[in-house]
Amino acid sequence: MLNKTAHYLSRSRSILPELIAILLAFLLSAIILTITGYSPLRAFNALFRGAFGNKFGIGQTLTQATPILFTSLSFLLAFRSGLFNIGIEGQFLMGAFAAAIAGSVFHGIPPIIHVLITLIAGGLFGALWCLIPALLKIFTGASEVITTMMMSYIATYLTSYFVNYRFKAPGWVAQTNPIQTSAVLPKILPPTQLSVSFLISLAFTVLVYYFLFKTYLGFQIRAVGLNPAASENRGIHVHSRLIMAFLFSAFVAGVGGAGEVLGVHGRFVEGFSPGYGWDGIAVSLVGRLHPFGCIFASILFGMLRAGGMTMTRMTKVPLDISLIIQSLVIILVAAPSFIKYIILRRKD
Amino acid sequence: MNLTSIINLSLFQASLRMATPIAFAALGGMFTERAGVVNIGLEGIMLNSAFFAVFATYLTGSSILGVLAGMASGCLLGIIMAILTVKYQGNQIVVGTGINVFGLGFSAYMCQKIWGSRGASDTIVGLRTLDLPFLNRIPWVGPIMNNQNELVYLMILISILSHFFLYSTRWGLRLRAVGENPQAADTSGINVYQYKYFFVILGCVVSSLGGVFLSIGHLNFFAWGMTSGRGFIALAAMILGKWTPFGCLAASFLFGITDALQMRLQALGILPSQIILLLPYAITIFILAGFVGRSIAPSDYKPYVKQ
Amino acid sequence: MAEALTLLGFTKHFPGVLANDHIDLSVNQGEIHGLLGENGAGKSVLMSTLYGLYRPDAGKVFIRGHEVTIGSPSQAIAHGIGMVHQQFNLVQNMSVWENIVLGKEPCQGFVLDRNQIRKELLALLKATGFEIDLDAKIRDLPIGLQQRVEILKILYRGADILIFDEPTAVLTPQEVDQLFKTFRQLANQGKTIIFISHKLKEIFCICDRVTVLRRGKKIGTLPITDATPESLAEMMVGRKIFFSFEKVKSPQPEVILSVEGLTVSRDRGGHALHNISFVIHSYEILGVAGVEGNGQTELAEVLVGLRYPQKGEIIFQGKDITHYPPKKRILMGISHIPEDRPKRGIISDFSVKDNLILGYEDLPPYKMGLITRNEMSIDQFAQNAIEEFEIATPGKETFVRNLSGGNQQKVVLARELSRNVALAIAAQPSRGLDIAASEYIRNKLIELKNNGSGVLLISADLDEIRSISDRVIVLYEGQIIGELSPEADEYQYGLLMGGTAC
């Protein structure tokens, strides 16, 4: 199931290939900017200043990094077992929605309990969203690439439906009622939006690391991802490990969505996610499918998003340049021999 | 409101229309898969070509140039995909995902830059519909096929040519071997790399016509994310059609029906639009669940390393 | 006789090994020339390099007296050389005729000229006397017929020097018979056959002359009439081979495994195993002899739990384990040395350490508490295993893909044999390994048996079976057609395995 990319990613030691991929991505984006009549220097300058220039920038960068860290952990978990869960966005949305409802519906509960309930609800709904693709994969072999993608579109429309009809808050914005204050995650760096959800994402990073590398379940999942036949021969229950990885992956995505609702927006707003699911995939690859690598990579991409808004405001460069940079990173990281060729001028 | 107001000739005509972008994508995807590369990036390729088609038509006023521009963008992305997956053996799914994000980002970026709006471009004059009266004489199928956009006919033509190519020419025979067992093809003296490169690129060019149709054949403008997952539905159509040209065509038509039905239902207003909009995706999963899984793919998807 | 093919000073290096060391070879036209040697002697490399799959480091090639350079298989084909490999190069989902003409298709303009194709292929079939349905799909054909398609492929391209690399490994004895008849027929038509094999008996059966290779060097060439099995064996191995190991008589044998009426169907329809019954005792090695492809793979799989039978039962230590999953059987003391090591045996991108505990990770002491790994115990175990089994590795964190085949197999052994083993299923355990590694494995199996375990040794290597088994059953077309004592004549074995009377 996994192939050269994953083998390479889990094997090599130096981070030079990833750095080169990132640099190249910026370089190519600079070319695109120039051709379309913008100044890359001004644009990137605004980008970095927006992201790191002051306390507000740093806060916003970390705020944007938080959901991306969650989704990258999600993709990583699935990929390590050999599955391509590219429907993370949908699981993220379902988790966010569940949290918005659980957060607003219960009154008078102590905050800690309420937060726990909403986060778990978010995770469970995220996991629920991968159940059909997981079962189809096991029983019919249907490609999870297609099925999770379909579920993601369904999630977008379904949440849109709920938020415009049944669960709509008064007013003309498509959003749910605000959550109770007992469910709100406190801000930790006012006046930025950075909240406790960032700390929760870090906690999950440690959790995922521990699970994958320090428990026997994680070991079995990784074994299945690298060689299901040998794993089966040694008594590992391949199907159950696949489902475990898939569910855990979607659970984390759901918690990520919940974190956004509880920590940043306070409700489910239609379209609140600018594609955090896709960011997660790129970050996971750049982070070399390792939880700690994802921390650094998600900060990088958080920077792209946070600084991007400043950049657009100041230089009128369209926001989507961050998507372009991101896509170039994904493409370049996907071909390790290509990068090696650039570094060493010889093929792997 | 009775059944015949929904299920009638115009439904099937619309189905053929809606099937066209999926069919283009599926046919192109079929070629790349038969070359041994699974093309997840169909969304990105189509979005890009949709944009370039509108852009070129906007600049030059000629929709023919729009088509060519769309195809050229598909060719470029195809070259990138080919180099990364064939020469440098990159992970095909990751490369495809990257191309998807690129298509999404780049088309939105350019749309914003040129027309100042991220959401939609100005409208342009697109391709024409053709009235071919002789078609009306063919029972059942004829009237459905008449009065369609030029690209629809192109799609049907490409399906027929692809079938002929794959099963009656030597190059088709060789392509089939290259996809299924590159080692066997290699020892038979076929230049496997040449075939892979060529058909990955050709596949992307054909797929790009799907995006071209969406923008200048159907709507006459470009809108953010207008492919709406058709690139993935095309993959399902390709699998359902067992990677054969006519199979892809038939499967795409099936999906075209769900798409056309969805629009009819929306017009009738009996269900909220979002529920109707999600139907095609749910149906895709349903079809995959029922029909797929045990099909025999035509290639092993592994990068070919010459021993 | 004219010389069809001559090699002078042929040399080929691979990283770390000199596969061909200045080999001189001359093959006459119209003869069947055997290329004999053990695994790793360099026979396949020699012919593959000649065929253009690799570049030789030095040496000259002459075809019918003219010097040629062959840089690719298509060039080899152009010079009239054709090769039938062990692994067929056939496209499973395409038909026989499509596979044969692939790459050299007669066309009318753009279109494949089906009439011409049919005409030419029918003529070819007539010339060779083969009978094959041209429209059949390869995946529906038995291996023997698939091999014929390979032969037709090279004949279609005008090969008159035909090289066969271990062609009999996957054939039933009848099919081997047919193949040798084909060799003779082709040779009579003036074609030159080069037959690569490690099987002495077959070389004797069909070859006119034989060249022996050992460790990359040519040891000698002689007409078959001047050779004896002993002289060839000595040339092949370089020393007298001692065929029997010390056999300890078992103290109190009791039945530990009993297989009754086992029927297992094949993936492609039909039965891989049909009504099999046998028993294995403690302190015993039961050998399963037979040519690969007669149900051996399925037998190992069904005993280990990777496959369930359609009928029959498997009783182990008194319990019916027929439908037990692999894990349960492992816990009961059944260990498995799989025949396909890269696929079933090891995880290439895991470390030696992780491969050693694969399957044990959820058992104490390797697991602490609920789910945590006990790194110290794991490290300790790995260290001990590496020492005890003399696994040559830079360290326990080294990825197993960097180890040699023999050492990879040692990792498998170390893992399988480190817990109490009541029954060991060893499937083709020394396949692809050099002499030293093979002997190590056989010694280990004997050690197991002497300590009371039962061992099921499935091997296509008859010498291996006879040298260490206590009893031998012969598997042919999914059935046990006989039981022999290891001391029984090779001839008797040959008869049971299908008979290869020339």
Image (tube, coloured by chain):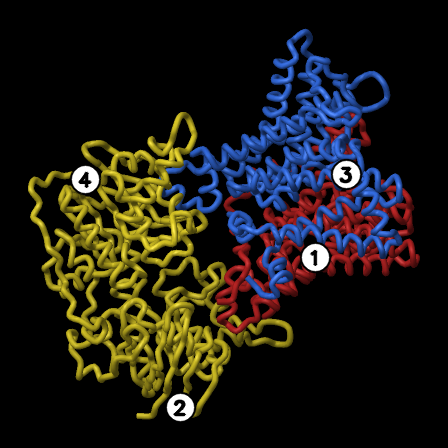
Chain colours: A blue, B red, C yellow
Marks 1/3 in contact by CB < 8 Å: the verdict is no
Q: Nearer the viewer, residue C109 or B81?
A: B81
Q: Nearer the viewer, residue A238 or A143?
A: A238
Locate residue B163, reporting x and y percent.
63, 60
In the image, which is nearer the foreground, mark 3 or mark 4? Answer: 3
**Is residue B5 shown above or below C402?**
above
| Separation (CA) of disc 2 from disc 4 | 60 Å
Task: Tell me the number on the disc at residue B34.
Answer: none
Secondary element at tag 1: helix
Identify the residue position indicated by label 2 in the image.
C64
Location of the N terminus of chain B (image quadrant): top right
Query: What crowding class fits label 1: few (fewer than 14 Cα within 10 Å), some (14-19), or many (20 or more)?
Result: many
Identify the residue position indicated by label 3 in the image.
A52
The residue type indicated by label 1 comes to Cys
Marks 3/4 in contact by CB < 8 Å: the verdict is no
Marks 3/2 in contact by CB < 8 Å: the verdict is no
Identify the residue position indicated by label 4 in the image.
C258
| Separation (CA) of disc 1 from disc 3 | 40 Å
Locate residue C181, reporting x and y percent.
28, 75
In the image, which is nearer the foreground, mark 1 or mark 3? Answer: 3
Query: What crowding class fits label 4: few (fewer than 14 Cα within 10 Å), some (14-19), or many (20 or more)?
Result: some
Identify the residue position indicated by label 1 in the image.
B204
